Image (cartoon, coloured by chain):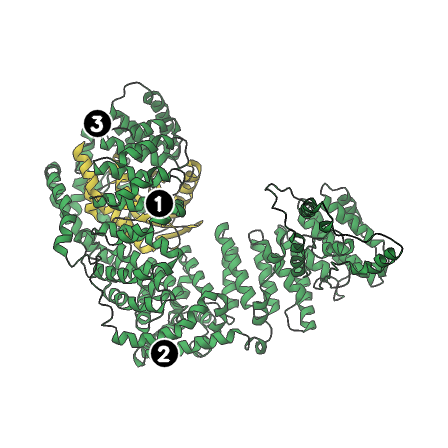
Chain colours: A yellow, B green
């Protein structure tokens, strides 16, 4: 299954994007996000970018005010997930141009569309920025 | 603001986003969202809402749910939006539905029809949107509704569609493997797709399939190797490159698959050595992504049959990881070390100090990873240090999930490697004291059994010493508050059996303690039951020994209390206790013999002691007994009834239908009860009062099944006791094979690597001079010091029986290693893959052209808009490129890129008003200006749009990649 969820949370702990690849109820999601964010925000920059939580491993990375958190299962290559996060940010940067937190908030659905191209069934399926952005650009064009 | 040229949204939406963005607390955010819910409930039900407006409402609903509130009132509108003709609305509708609903939601049925229609659309983007939804919304029951269309789409002209169709099929496989079992060949076919994206996606389902059954896919090894080779040789389109690495994510997936296929398979492993070696050589170990691939190579190398050259390269990579300053790399290094150590146990030693540093690091993640490594390298010589460390750590954490895990590891290691019985008991006491409620109750039963049976060597004095020391330690602990229930059960049982056995403690002392336990845990019936059973045993032993029994007043009142208990079990125990006390010594001795918990209880199934009585009766003219199933006419009913009777004895209702009557049924019971005949086992037959009572007294709780009670004593006994006994144990045969393996590895990697290891160990020794003596001591106790390396192979032999698969693989290994050395010499020839469909690179002109083409057109379409945006941003876009350059220049050096943001954490607020402050923060970065200017630009744009960002929250505008 690989990736279980992808979260973007700012440093006040407010969720900016949440995508789960297995179904959790609203309450479960709320509790999970609270616990994880508390754990990750408490860590300093020297510490590992990986945290174990229940049966998940969380790989996280901070960009300015925004934390990107990816929950994976045990078989996943943590460093690769760390770079996957960076690829996601680079892709958003290419699309939005110097992407910032507000871009994601104003274009929540587009951020989701990019994720839909990159990850399906919890697997990374596309890593070419051109391929990821093509359908989104076409859609912009059409509308 | 990006290529879409401004916001297409209303002022209302922008205000909402702005207020959420500037909310200072969760409470404020909740207020905003609750208000928003009220607004949406009113608005969304209005008639004739323009489509664009509706799309916005749907996104606002997504916000509501994302921020933790229920938006179910609007689900139906999201569902309706999926019917829309406009692609952007349709896709937004699908997105919202996948975020809101799980696959079993009632509304899904309304979407299946739409999905079916969209899968047939001429617009491939509509098909893609539908396939996205298929992956999220189709459950096992609805698979057949879309399956034929999905299969058809596997051959679609657009690669994006084929890719998503593969993933839809993958999803069906995950949901219900049987629904697509006949379609597995499609995955094989798509592996050879012209488009690298489709090929890359196909690796996901194939990896799942291979994980379950690798033997059916051995024929694909050549294909995977050939693809990996081409990827590594940069024959995929440039757009797959990531930080100068060719398609690293595909490489990693392929390496994972190869690791599965090469595990325990000599031929498959040999096919991969060259390409894995090439990749390891090529990896850029200065970038994160390079190290990610390198790590995956190490995993692969340690999974397939060992190859000396690859092992050496892996060891080098690991030492680079461990020596790095980055915690992330150290973490990966420790993990990799844990994998490689199974094959070459020597490797840990040269990194001992690095490992200890990680163990003592304040970073919990690193510490836990290191414990995992220690767990893997535990052997009799270092078990005490390791388990003590683990327990120390366990005592101090609150995380129950991890506490459970580490406690069960302690138990496992202690059972397997305990150097002495005393140590074992003490260790178990500590584990029970601090995590007793978290460990499996089986562990408690195992402990009781171990104390009861002793340790196998017919050395009764050692066993009784062990029991005395257990009793003593329990009497010391018993007064402590808040002992876990499982631990108290063990304590009660041991005190009952052996409390008075060595004559050190009087019966009244022990019974007093037991009464205290029962009293202070009055809400725990299980503990009380154990306590009463123990009391009964103590009194029975006293009576049998001819001593007079004086019931303590607290014991008397306990019995009275329990005779009126709501629990019938406790009541019965109380009455039994009273009955036993009133019997004479001879009777008591036969009911409750001393130290008989390990005696086998023989059950006379044929009731032979009645034979003479039967004979007498027959002689007196009684009718002979005819077994029920032999009586004419009632055969079926009778066997049914006997079955019925059998079931009834388990005291539970049975809900499933009865099996068809079979004449063999009665014979089912005896074999089971034969295997039951060990002592801790409930006797199923209720017709033997004496035996029943005895078992009840021995094991007050018989709810756990007989097989569960069984400890793996065979293994333990061999390990324990005097070393003279343990060394010729059966495990040596495998350990000797291990030794030869090591021998081979050494002789293979002649002179050069050997001297290298020596050098590094010298280095570490030299550095040890500056290292605190405590650390040195710890290192010596963990790794056994470098002075006696010949001891290690034999001790690893002890680990072999633990993982049976491993030992199986290891016997292969000898061959693998020997032949691998020959292979690595002649290796150059055999791996030239036959030219096949998979050759993505060779016909590069023809293959890549169709792949790039649509996007070229696309780019053509998009160019103007990009230009426009460039104009929009004026100065920014020109500086943007330099931004990227700096970003890429940054990448290699920053082990964690997040360090860039580091200084921000403390005083972000204070920067508030002036973005320029960031110049101070990024002293190394040259392109300050654009960031600031860009932020201001955005600021201005947003103001133009009617949103006035307060200076409170400049974070919202900060470039993520700044």
Distance (Cα) linking label 3 and label 1: 44 Å
Depth order, front residue of B739/B361 = B739
Sort mark 3 into few (<14), some (14-19) or many (20+) by Cα contacts within 10 Å.
some
Q: Which residue occupies 23% across, 62% down?
A: B229
Viewer-side label of 1, 2: 1
Q: Nearer the viewer, mark 3 or mark 1?
A: 1
Q: Residue furthest top?
A: B47
Question: Relative to B243, does residue B451 appear above or below in the rendering?
Answer: below
Q: Residue at x 73, y 55 (%)?
A: B697
- The chain holding disc 3 is B
Of marks 3 and 2, which one's residue comes earlier in the chain? 2
Residue B93 appears anywhere in the view: yes
Write down the quadrant of residue B957 in the picture.
top left
- Provide the residue designation for mark 1: B171
Mark 2 burial class by Cα count in 10 Å: few <14, some 14-19, many 20+: some
**Residue labelled with disc 2:** B746
- Indicate the quadrant where residue B70 lies: top left
Q: Give the residue pinned by disc 3.
A: B946
SS at mark 1? helix
How many marks on residues? 3
Q: Earlier in the sequence, mark 1 or mark 2?
A: 1
Where is residue B652 shown, x and y percent of the image?
Answer: 65, 43
Local SS, label 3: loop
Q: Which callout, 3 or 2, points to the residue nearer the camera?
A: 2
């Amino acid at each position: 299954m690989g990736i279980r969820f992808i979260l973007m949370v700012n440093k006040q702990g407010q969720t900016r994007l949440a995508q789960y690849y297995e179904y959790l109820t609203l309450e479960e999601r709320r509790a999970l996000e609270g616990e994880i964010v508390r754990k990750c925000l408490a860590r300093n920059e020297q510490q590992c970018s990986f945290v174990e939580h229940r049966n998940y491993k969380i790989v996280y990375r901070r960009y300015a005010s925004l934390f990107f958190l990816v929950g994976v299962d045990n078989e996943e290559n943590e460093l690769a997930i760390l770079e996957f996060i960076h690829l996601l940010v680079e892709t958003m940067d290419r699309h939005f141009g110097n992407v910032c937190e507000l871009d994601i908030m104003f274009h929540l659905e587009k951020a989701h569309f990019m994720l839909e191209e990159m990850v399906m069934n919890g697997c990374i399926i596309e890593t070419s920025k051109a391929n990821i952005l093509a359908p989104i650009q076409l859609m912009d064009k059409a509308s | 603001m990006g290529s879409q040229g401004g916001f297409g949204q209303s002022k209302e939406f922008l205000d909402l986003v702005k207020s959420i963005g500037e909310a200072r607390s969760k409470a404020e955010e909740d207020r905003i969202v609750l208000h928003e819910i009220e607004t949406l409930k009113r608005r969304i039900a209005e008639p004739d809402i323009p489509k664009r407006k509706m799309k916005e409402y749907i996104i606002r609903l997504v916000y509501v749910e994302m921020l933790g509130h229920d938006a179910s009132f609007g689900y139906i509108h999201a569902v309706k939006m999926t019917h829309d003709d406009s692609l952007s609305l349709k896709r937004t509708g699908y997105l919202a539905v996948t975020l809101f609903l799980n696959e079993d939601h009632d509304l899904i049925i309304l979407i299946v029809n739409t999905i079916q229609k969209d899968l047939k659309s001429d617009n491939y983007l509509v098909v893609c949107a539908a396939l996205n939804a298929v992956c999220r919304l189709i459950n096992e029951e609805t698979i057949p509704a879309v399956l034929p269309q999905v299969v058809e789409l596997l051959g679609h002209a657009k690669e994006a569609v084929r890719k998503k169709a593969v993933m839809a099929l993958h999803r069906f496989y995950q949901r219900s493997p049987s629904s697509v079992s006949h379609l597995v060949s499609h995955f094989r076919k798509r592996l050879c797709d012209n488009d690298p994206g489709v090929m890359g996606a196909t690796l996901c389902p194939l990896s799942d399939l291979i994980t379950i059954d690798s033997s059916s896919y051995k024929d694909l090894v050549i294909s995977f190797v050939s693809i990996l080779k081409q990827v590594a040789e940069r024959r995929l389109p440039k757009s797959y490159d990531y930080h100068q690495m060719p398609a690293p994510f595909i490489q990693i997936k392929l390496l994972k698959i190869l690791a599965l296929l090469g595990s325990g398979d000599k031929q498959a492993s040999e096919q991969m050595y060259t390409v894995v070696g090439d990749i390891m050589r090529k990896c850029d170990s200065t970038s994160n992504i390079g190290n990610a691939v390198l790590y995956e190579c190490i995993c692969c190398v340690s999974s397939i049959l060992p190859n000396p050259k690859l092992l050496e390269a892996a060891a080098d990579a690991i030492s680079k990881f461990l020596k790095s300053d980055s915690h992330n790399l150290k973490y990966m290094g420790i993990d990799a070390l844990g994998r490689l150590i199974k094959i070459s146990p020597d490797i840990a030693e040269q990194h001992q100090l690095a490992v200890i540093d990680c163990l003592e690091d304040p970073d919990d993640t690193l510490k836990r990873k290191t414990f995992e490594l220690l767990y893997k390298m535990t052997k009799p010589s270092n078990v005490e240090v390791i388990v003590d460390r683990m327990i120390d750590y366990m005592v101090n954490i609150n995380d129950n999930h991890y506490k459970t895990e580490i406690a069960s590891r302690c138990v496992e290691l202690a059972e397997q490697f305990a150097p002495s019985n005393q140590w074992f008991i003490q260790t178990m006491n500590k584990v029970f004291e601090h995590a007793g409620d978290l460990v499996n109750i089986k562990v408690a039963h195992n402990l009781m059994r171990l104390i009861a049976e002793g340790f196998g060597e017919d050395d009764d004095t050692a066993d009784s010493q062990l029991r005395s020391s257990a009793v003593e330690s329990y009497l010391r602990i018993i007064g402590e508050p808040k002992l876990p229930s499982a631990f108290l059960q063990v304590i009660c049982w041991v005190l009952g059996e052996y409390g008075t056995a060595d004559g050190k403690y009087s019966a009244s002392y022990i019974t007093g303690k037991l009464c205290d336990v029962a009293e202070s845990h009055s809400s725990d019936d299980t503990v009380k039951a154990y306590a009463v059973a123990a009391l009964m045993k103590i009194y029975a032993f006293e009576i049998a020994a001819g001593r007079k029994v004086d019931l303590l007043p607290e014991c008397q009142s306990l019995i009275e209390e329990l005779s009126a208990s709501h629990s019938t079990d406790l009541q019965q125990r109380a009455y039994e206790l009273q009955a036993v006390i009133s019997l004479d010594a001879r009777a008591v001795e036969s009911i409750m013999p001393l130290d008989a918990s390990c005696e086998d209880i023989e059950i006379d199934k044929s009731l032979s002691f009645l034979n003479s009585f039967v004979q007498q009766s027959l002689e007196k003219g009684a009718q002979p007994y005819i077994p029920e199933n032999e009586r004419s006419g009632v055969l079926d009913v009778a066997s049914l009834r006997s079955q019925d009777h059998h079931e009834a004895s388990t005291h539970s209702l049975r809900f499933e239908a009865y099996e068809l009557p079979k004449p063999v049924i009665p014979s089912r019971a005896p074999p089971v009860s034969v295997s039951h005949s060990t002592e801790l086992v409930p006797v199923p037959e209720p017709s033997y009062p004496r035996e029943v009572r005895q078992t009840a007294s021995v094991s007050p709780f018989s709810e756990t099944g007989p097989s569960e009670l069984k400890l793996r004593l065979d293994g333990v006994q061999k390990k324990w006791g005097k070393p003279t006994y343990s060394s010729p144990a059966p495990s040596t045969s495998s350990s000797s094979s291990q030794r030869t393996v090591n021998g081979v590895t050494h002789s293979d990697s002649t002179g050069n690597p050997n001297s290298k290891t020596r050098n590094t160990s010298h280095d570490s020794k030299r550095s040890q001079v500056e290292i605190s003596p405590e650390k040195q001591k710890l290192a010596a106790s963990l790794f056994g010091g470098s002075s006696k390396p010949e001891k290690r192979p034999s001790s690893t032999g002890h680990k072999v029986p633990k993982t049976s698969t491993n030992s199986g693989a290891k016997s292969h290994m000898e061959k693998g290693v020997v032949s691998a050395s020959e292979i690595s010499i002649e290796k150059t020839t055999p791996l030239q893959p036959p030219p096949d469909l998979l050759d993505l690179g060779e016909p590069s002109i023809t293959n890549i052209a169709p792949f790039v083409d649509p996007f070229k057109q696309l780019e053509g379409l998009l160019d103007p808009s990009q230009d426009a945006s460039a104009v929009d941003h004026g100065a920014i876009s020109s500086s943007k490129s330099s931004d990227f350059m700096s970003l890429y220049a940054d990448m290699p050096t920053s082990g964690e890129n997040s360090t860039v943001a580091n200084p921000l954490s403390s005083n972000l607020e204070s920067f508030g008003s002036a973005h320029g402050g960031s110049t101070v923060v990024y002293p190394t970065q040259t392109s300050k200006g654009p960031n600031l200017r860009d932020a201001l630009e955005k600021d201005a744009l947003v103001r133009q749009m009617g949103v006035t960002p307060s200076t409170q929250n400049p974070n919202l505008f900060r470039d993520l990649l700044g």
